[in-house]
Image: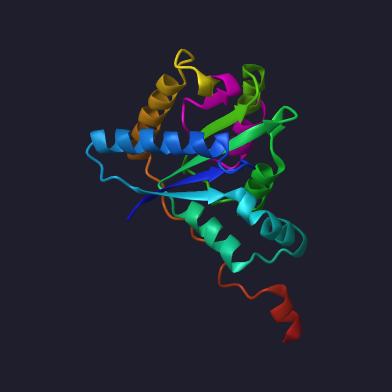
């Protein structure tokens, strides 16, 4: 069964990034269902739960079983919804570290919907300045509409957040149907690791 992955780097429980990711996933599933596509399973990666394992992998170059499963989940997803809080005019460190450590080909041609949360609307520039170059570099197929949610957006029905989420989800569903992703296959998966070669 196909699946969508929500990758969220929120630090709270619950976090506004997780809430935004969940709503975007719901809107995407709604759009896919309306298009006659079977509803995919939605899986969520909370990066704060993988923080220690990401740090260990960064220094050791050996992923834990749980971290490898997270990477594999992204590499087999029909679409990825990537949500980060904005800190100091950019994505947070966990978000950047996770995508830095993915094998470079994992997101190639894979539909990605970008989203971010922050205190005020002025932080929305982080999507264009930090997220978009990252996903272009990783050769993802980026959805045309990203969503930014400021703190005030959650407390008012007049901000249009729900409308933006519905629009982004519908467009993302169209992209997933039009540009289906293929599962990532690591061309070096069966190559012996360096330690094994030295041991021989």
Residue name at image x 39 percent, y 31 percent? 169
The segment highlighted magenta reads 129-152
Q: Nearer the viewer, residue 192 or 85?
A: 85
Q: Is residue 60 above or below residue 84?
A: below
Is 149 one of the magenta-colored residues? Answer: yes
Q: How far from the left and from the top, in percent, is residue 92?
A: 69, 38
Whether residue 74 is situated above or below residue 61 in the rendered picture: above
- Where in the figure is residue 135, as x and y percent of width and height? 58, 38
Total residue callouts = 0
Does residue 18 show up? yes
Question: Which residue is farthest bottom?
Answer: 200
Residue at the (56%, 51%) spot, across then down: 105
Quarter of the image containing the C terminus? Answer: bottom right
Which colour scheme appears in the figure? rainbow
Q: Residue furthest left?
A: 36
Q: Closer to the camera, 113 or 51?
A: 51
Q: Residue at x 71, y 42 (%)?
A: 93
Q: Position of residue 67 (x, y in %)?
A: 60, 61
Left or right of 200? Residue 27 is left
Where residue 192 sits, quadrant-wise, is: bottom right
User: In the rendering, at what x and y percent does residue 109 appear?
Assistant: 47, 43
Left or right: 185, with 170 as reference point = right
Q: Is residue 47 left or right of residue 41?
A: right
Magenta span contains residue 24: no
**Which residue lies at the image location 46% right of the left edge and 26% below the top edge?**
144
Q: Quadrant of the N terminus?
A: bottom left
């Amino acid at each position: 069964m196909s699946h969508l992955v929500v990758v969220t780097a929120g630090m709270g429980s619950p976090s506004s990034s997780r809430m935004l990711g969940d709503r975007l996933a719901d809107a995407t599933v709604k759009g896919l269902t309306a298009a006659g596509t079977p509803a995919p399973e939605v899986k969520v990666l909370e990066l704060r739960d993988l923080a220690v394992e990401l740090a260990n992998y960064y220094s050791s170059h050996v992923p834990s079983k749980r971290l490898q499963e997270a990477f594999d989940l992204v590499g087999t997803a029909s679409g990825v919804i990537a949500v980060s809080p904005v800190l100091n005019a950019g994505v947070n460190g966990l978000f950047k570290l996770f995508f830095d450590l993915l094998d470079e080909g994992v997101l190639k041609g894979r539909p990605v919907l970008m989203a971010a949360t922050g205190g005020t609307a002025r932080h929305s520039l982080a999507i264009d300045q930090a997220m978009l170059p990252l996903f272009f570099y990783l050769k993802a197929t980026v959805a045309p509409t990203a969503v930014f949610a400021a703190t005030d957006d959650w407390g008012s029905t007049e901000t249009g957040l729900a409308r933006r989420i519905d629009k982004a989800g519908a467009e993302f569903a169209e992209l997933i149907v039009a540009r289906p992703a293929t599962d990532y296959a690591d061309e070096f998966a069966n190559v012996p690791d360096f330690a094994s070669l030295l041991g021989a």
